[in-house]
């Protein structure tokens, strides 16, 4: 890239390197991350869109991994007359959890959702409009017992500081049913299962303690065209606004929601979690903007 240009891209913070950050700073690149850019009401539009895709996709993935042909339990994801329904456990109560639960409930599964934020649990129950959904805060005893019975466990806890909390220990994973399925959507931020390790679309699974692990980052890329359309719908208005305001700098200086996406600016790191990860000084972008204005 040329000196002083701008890059807007995905940023998988668990795999970025110090060399990458230093290269950006050396060329004084203004770098923005998809998952940090906010909208005008404080939401995270890219995160929400990709979370919708991921939540809808995980049940399709789980259904395949449970099949006999994939050496799963050989059970259907859902339930039929006279046969107990499949049990699905979801960690987190955000957008991924909502869309995963919608798909799971539509198939007739039994769904349990765990999160430490009561307001999120209350909100997801209201959104699902399904009073049979089991919700609980995360405590070791209750979660361990639920994991022992579950057929599909989904990790969908997102952290604001860039690192998902690891809430399921290796011992808890070892207590799960043989050939049960674990899908860690949070692997983009490090994962919330202790046994999780990044996999790829070419080799998406591995087994540990006889539990099938699916830990592919950026699940939305499975549906590349859908994801592309969703991203275009969000960024087209932003790019038009950048042009109308006279460039990236003016866009940053006059729109705090857009400036939230910046993690390096003119030779310095402006995102605190990234600065702490690499033990680098962190510039306060708000002070830079205030000085400009």
Image (tube, helix red, strand yellow):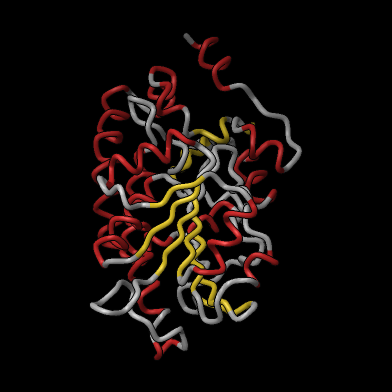
Height in image: 218 above or below 268? below
Which residue shows up at 34% across the image and 56% down it?
101
Which residue shows up at 37% across the image and 27% down it?
247
Location of residue 111 in the rendering, given as x and y in whole percent from the top left corner: 38, 59
Which residue shows up at 43% across the image and 43% down it?
34
Q: Observer-nearest residue: 293 or 92?
A: 92
Location of residue 181 in the rendering, given as x and y in whole percent from the top left corner: 49, 73
Q: Is residue 50 visible?
A: no
User: Within the image, what quadrant is residue 123 found in?
Assistant: top left
User: Within the image, what quadrant is residue 274 found in?
Assistant: top right
Q: Is residue 276 left or right of residue 251?
A: right
Q: Is residue 185 visible?
A: yes
User: Within the image, what quadrant is residue 152 found in?
Assistant: bottom left
Q: Is residue 221 left or right of residue 171?
A: left
Which residue shows up at 54% across the image and 73% down it?
213
Height in image: 269 above or below 196? above
Height in image: 168 above or below 80? above
Q: Observer-nearest residue: 48 or 212?
A: 212
């Amino acid at each position: 890239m040329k000196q002083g240009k701008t890059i807007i891209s995905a940023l998988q913070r668990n795999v970025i390197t110090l060399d990458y950050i230093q290269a950006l700073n050396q060329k004084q690149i203004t770098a923005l991350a998809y998952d940090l850019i906010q909208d005008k009401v404080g939401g995270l539009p890219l995160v929400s869109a990709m979370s919708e895709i991921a939540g809808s996709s995980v049940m399709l993935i789980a259904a395949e991994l449970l099949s006999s042909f994939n050496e799963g339990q050989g059970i259907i994801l859902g339930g039929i007359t006279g046969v107990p329904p499949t049990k699905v456990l979801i960690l987190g109560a955000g957008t991924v959890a909502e869309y995963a639960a919608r798909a799971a409930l539509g198939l007739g599964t039994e769904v349990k959702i765990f999160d430490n934020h009561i307001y999120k649990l209350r909100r997801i129950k209201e959104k699902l409009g399904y009073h049979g959904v089991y919700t609980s805060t995360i405590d070791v005893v209750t979660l361990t017992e639920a994991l022992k019975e579950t057929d599909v466990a989904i990790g969908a806890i997102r952290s604001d500081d860039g690192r998902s909390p690891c809430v399921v220990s290796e011992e808890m994973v070892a207590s799960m049913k043989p050939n049960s399925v674990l899908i860690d959507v949070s692997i983009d931020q490090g994962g919330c299962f202790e046994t999780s390790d990044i996999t790829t679309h070419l080799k998406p699974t591995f087994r540990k303690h006889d539990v099938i692990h699916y830990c592919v980052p950026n699940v939305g890329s499975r549906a590349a065209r859908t994801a592309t359309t969703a991203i275009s719908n969000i960024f087209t208005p932003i790019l038009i606004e950048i042009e109308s305001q006279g460039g990236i700098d003016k866009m940053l200086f006059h729109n705090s929601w857009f400036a939230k996406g910046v993690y390096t600016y003119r030779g310095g790191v402006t995102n605190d979690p990234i600065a702490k990860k690499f033990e680098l000084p962190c510039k306060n972008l708000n002070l830079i903007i205030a000085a400009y204005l």
